[in-house]
Image (cartoon, rainbow, N blue to C red):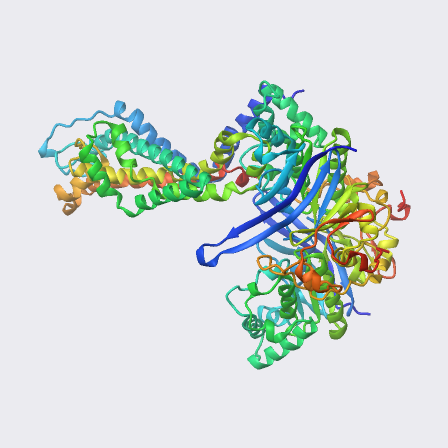
């Protein structure tokens, strides 16, 4: 299958006073059409920067210094300004982190919908509102109630659903969601995830979900990409990642995520601290915290190797790792 | 049977907002009664806006309740003479969620941590204070301490900062620490190490903890054999030993909550179906529902639920605030 | 343990207060320029008068002379050397302005902090006072006070200048304190029982100081301007070397602006005031970075 999105060797650097910071350091990933790809990583993993790069929206002083991004066989980084305007929101749309709080507080929802749609192409107000109503019903909101309201009149959960509708207005092929449920309570979170699964089925949407929460990943993802220090560490199907993880960081993440079920004693944190992106250690970026690190890990950067169908690991010693250790 | 360190009796907290015509009242805590025994760990769980932070602040004396009593070792803290109150103060500390806001940005780590030692004359001079602070940092796993003493808060990582905040709370060896979402702003891979540290402090120094969080999974990890109390919109709805309450929740809100919490296991995560609630929306805290505040969303609600406020009463092995507790169908977390 | 010795701490302290600021200034050329300008004026005020003699005898034959080797900034209406006058005047001007800014800052911090911390009725009353001070124009008030209380020396002069000028600074301090008061680190200080004194002087004040320090030079400039006015109206002993006075005379009394070759006489006091202000503004930027550890990273 030809992937809908293909990123190869992406490098994004931020030029700061104290030096150059590599937010993304050679990341590659594929997203197949119709799937939900979860990109998992903590602070400093580079997942948000990766998402911005896909839309070519990296804010200065950030710059894409290397790499290739192909969407639907189009070279995204080579698109002109005008072509980018056609690409953004019409082919790929993004729901930003805490976007529910970033809506214009003095504009009614209906107006924000029309504004957004018309900014990316010609459409009549009636057409936009009709589409918006259809989508609102899909996310289980009542259009008559929501369209005439201001953002502050809606609850957090409702606002988040409105943002999702805003992103789907122009029928994008792919939707990127950055931590879509962080500010919401648990019950609403479960509801939103259900709705996302619904929407994806009804619209045949491809989704890329950025999160640090393994529990959310377990609920909704088809495949998982694990990132650390700007690099991709492991890729695989959801069962492969959770029940048969190969990379020590992935294993560590799963063991460090407390759960309502299972033995508490199995859970343990990952020692050490998050990576220093200004002055990264040589070799594998995870080696200071890895229980299996060898000399080779401290000197040589591991390559992302394919070890099965769509199964990728970036670790020198992956076949030696025993999960129960 | 150990004595309770802190007891809250029928505590109410009402905040008044607005002026004259636009006055609004927010009852953040409604008739809350609970106690924490020496060396105990109690988790206070609820969604954001349910009043758990307010309850925590009442417990450390940062807020004075509108009515009800706060007892420290059996004595009402708001009726205490100054000297006794000072002793209570020393023994009830707070750890905040945002470690960045919890430290003075223009003071070094040493300056922030040495203040209590110097103030209470636990260190006679600067040299002693520096030694004591270094010891404290080592206890918190911040080694070598030299690296941290003269740094400013923004020069530390989130996890390190939270350890400093914890260090400060522990410095006077208090009897109780109220930890308000201590790990929510920390990377997932590091959360357990902070919780493990807190557990060690509980075991080594007998410090009781009130662990406030919305994350049931970390509550389960931290509390272990302790108790858990669940809050909804200012009311305590269920309280009891963690294993029993989570394994067999009896209050409909807790059942709904547990059914909605995702687990990091794909097979199990996809099996769970959320409990159907009548409404998804959280009521406006300034216009709360009458009687049991959960009744508009409760699938089992009857007339009495809208009329009378249920109080925490014993039922089998726990306390529950529900008029129909006996009739609620059983629900097991797997 | 090596770290806990006082020498180690002292080294750390020196590092933070001398070495790191030095590095910041090296990088921020503008701030460095500002510091040099301010140091220049400081030197001028302290040792300048010893280096350059002042001769206040009039010599009308030499009046309004353009700049020359004998008179680098020309001469005034009385044939006196402008440069010497500027240098000698700097001492009084700067000391009065400094004192005025100092008193203003002290009053503003005291009022702003008490209002912000106490809240309630105290805050309401003090805010009313602050608003009164801000709405009633300061100059007429200074005139009244200046005519009632004799201004005899720099200190009284500074006091009179400061008595009605602390309003906006106090308001800024008050709002900063209001926001800081609710911050978690203040709550922690309260639960630790560290006491009001500690909270005010060790926690809040260090957060408020950067703002005060940065506005200091600006407050000084306002004082210079006001001092000219008071001097002009005869409420202060007349001083021919006060820059503001010099400027006023040059423009109004001596008609020097109509004489192109007396440009130096007109522009010199103006330039001195502007240069001082420029130095302050440039340095303020670096000062913010020095005083606010967060910006140093």
B24 or C292, nearer to the observer: B24
* Residue B61 image point, x, y percent: 60, 38
* Residue C197 image point, x, y percent: 49, 29
Q: Quick check: C84 above or below B242?
A: above
Res. B265 image quadrant: bottom right
Can residue A11 be seen here? The reply is yes
B31 or A96, nearer to the observer: B31
Q: Residue furthest top?
A: B124
Can residue C26 be seen here? The reply is no
Apparent side of residue B88 relative to residue A259 in the rendered image (left or right): left
**Image point 60% across, 71% down: which residue?**
A146
Q: Quadrant of the N terminus of chain B?
A: top right
Q: Residue furthest left?
A: C61
A122 or C47, nearer to the observer: A122
* Residue B146 image point, x, y percent: 65, 27
Res. C34 image quadrant: top left
């Amino acid at each position: 299958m030809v992937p809908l999105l293909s990123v190869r060797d992406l490098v994004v650097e931020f030029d700061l006073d104290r030096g150059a910071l590599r937010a993304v350091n050679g990341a590659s990933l594929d997203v197949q059409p119709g799937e939900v790809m979860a990109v998992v990583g903590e602070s400093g993993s580079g997942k948000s920067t990766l998402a911005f790069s896909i839309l070519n929206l990296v804010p200065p002083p950030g710059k894409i210094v290397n790499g290739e991004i192909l969407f639907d066989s189009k070279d995204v980084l080579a698109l002109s300004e005008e072509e980018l305007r056609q690409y953004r929101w019409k082919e790929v749309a993004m729901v930003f982190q805490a976007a529910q709080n970033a809506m214009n507080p003095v504009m009614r929802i209906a107006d924000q919908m029309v504004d957004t749609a018309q900014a990316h192409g010609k459409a009549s107000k009636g057409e936009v509102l009709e589409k918006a109503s259809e989508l609102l019903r899909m996310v289980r909101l009542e259009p008559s109630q929501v369209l005439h309201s201001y953002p502050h009149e809606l609850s957090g959960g409702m606002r988040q659903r409105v943002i999702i509708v805003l992103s789907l207005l122009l029928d994008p092929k792919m939707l990127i969601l950055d931590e879509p449920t962080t500010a919401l309570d648990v019950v609403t979170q479960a509801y939103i995830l259900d709705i996302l699964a619904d929407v994806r089925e009804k619209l045949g949407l491809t989704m890329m979900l950025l999160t640090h929460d393994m529990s959310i990943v377990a609920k909704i993802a088809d495949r998982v990409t694990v990132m650390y220090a700007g690099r991709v560490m492991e890729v695989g199907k959801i069962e492969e990642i959770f029940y048969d993880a190969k990379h020590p960081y992935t294993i560590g993440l799963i063991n460090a995520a407390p759960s309502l079920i299972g033995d508490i004693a199995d859970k343990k944190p990952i020692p050490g601290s998050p990576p220093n992106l200004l002055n990264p250690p040589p070799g594998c970026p995870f080696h200071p915290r890895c229980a299996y690190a060898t000399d080779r890990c401290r000197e040589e950067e591991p390559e992302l190797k394919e070890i099965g169908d769509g199964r990728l690991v970036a670790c020198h010693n992956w076949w030696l790792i025993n999960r129960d250790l | 049977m150990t004595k309770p360190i802190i007891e809250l009796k029928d505590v109410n907290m009402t905040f008044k907002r607005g002026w004259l015509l636009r006055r609004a009242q927010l009852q953040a805590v409604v008739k809350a009664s609970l106690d924490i025994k020496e060396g105990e760990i109690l988790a206070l769980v609820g969604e954001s806006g349910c009043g758990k932070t307010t309850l925590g602040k009442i417990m450390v004396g940062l807020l004075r309740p509108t009515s009800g009593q706060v007892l420290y070792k059996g004595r009402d803290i708001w009726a205490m003479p100054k000297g006794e109150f000072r002793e209570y103060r020393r023994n009830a500390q707070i750890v905040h969620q945002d470690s960045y806001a919890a430290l003075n940005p223009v003071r070094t780590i040493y300056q922030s941590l040495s203040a209590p030692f110097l103030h209470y004359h636990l260190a006679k001079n600067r040299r002693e204070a520096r030694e004591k602070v270094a010891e404290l940092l080592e206890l918190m796993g911040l080694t070598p301490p030299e690296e941290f003493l003269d740094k400013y808060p923004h020069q530390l990582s989130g996890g390190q900062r939270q350890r400093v905040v914890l260090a400060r709370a522990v410095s006077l060896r208090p009897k109780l620490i109220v930890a308000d979402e201590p790990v929510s702003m920390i990377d997932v891979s590091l959360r357990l190490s902070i919780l493990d540290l807190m557990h060690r402090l509980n075991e080594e120094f007998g410090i009781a903890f009130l662990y406030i969080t919305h994350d049931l999974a970390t509550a389960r990890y931290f509390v272990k054999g302790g108790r858990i109390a669940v809050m909804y919109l200012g009311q305590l709805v269920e309280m009891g030993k963690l294993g029993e309450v989570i394994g067999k929740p009896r209050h409909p809100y807790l059942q709904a909550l547990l059914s909605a919490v995702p687990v990091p296991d794909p097979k199990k995560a996809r099996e769970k179906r959320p409990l159907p609630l009548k409404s998804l929306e959280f009521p406006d805290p300034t216009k709360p529902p009458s009687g049991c505040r959960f009744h508009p969303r409760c699938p089992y609600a009857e007339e009495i639920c809208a009329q009378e406020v249920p109080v925490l009463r014993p039922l089998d092995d726990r306390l529950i605030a529900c008029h129909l507790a006996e009739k609620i169908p059983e629900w097991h977390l797997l | 343990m090596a770290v806990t010795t006082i020498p180690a701490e002292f080294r750390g302290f020196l590092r933070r207060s001398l070495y790191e600021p030095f590095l910041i200034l090296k990088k921020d050329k503008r701030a460095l320029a500002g510091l040099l300008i301010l140091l220049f004026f400081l030197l001028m005020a302290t040792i300048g008068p010893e280096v350059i003699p002042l001769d206040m005898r009039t010599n009308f034959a030499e009046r309004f002379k353009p700049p020359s080797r004998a008179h680098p900034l020309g001469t005034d209406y009385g044939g006196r050397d402008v440069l010497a006058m500027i240098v000698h005047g700097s001492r009084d001007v700067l000391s009065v302005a400094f004192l005025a800014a100092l008193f203003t800052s002290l009053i503003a911090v005291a009022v702003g902090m008490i209002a912000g911390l106490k809240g309630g009725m105290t805050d309401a009353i003090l805010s009313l006072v602050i608003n009164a001070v801000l709405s009633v124009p300061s100059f007429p008030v200074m005139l009244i006070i200046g005519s009632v209380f004799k201004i005899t020396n720099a200190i009284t002069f500074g006091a009179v200048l400061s008595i009605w000028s602390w309003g906006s600074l106090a308001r800024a301090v008050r709002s900063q304190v209001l926001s800081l008061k609710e911050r978690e680190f203040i709550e922690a200080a309260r639960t630790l029982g560290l006491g009001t004194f500690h909270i005010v002087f060790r926690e809040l004040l260090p957060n408020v100081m950067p703002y005060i320090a940065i506005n200091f030079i600006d407050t000084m400039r306002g004082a210079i301007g006001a001092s000219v006015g008071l001097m002009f109206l005869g409420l202060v002993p007349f001083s021919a070397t006060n820059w503001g006075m010099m400027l006023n005379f040059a423009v109004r009394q001596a008609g020097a602006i109509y004489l192109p070759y007396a440009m130096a006489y007109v522009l010199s006091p103006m330039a001195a005031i502007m240069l001082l202000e420029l130095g302050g503004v440039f340095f303020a930027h670096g000062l913010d970075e020095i005083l606010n550890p967060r910006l140093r990273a």
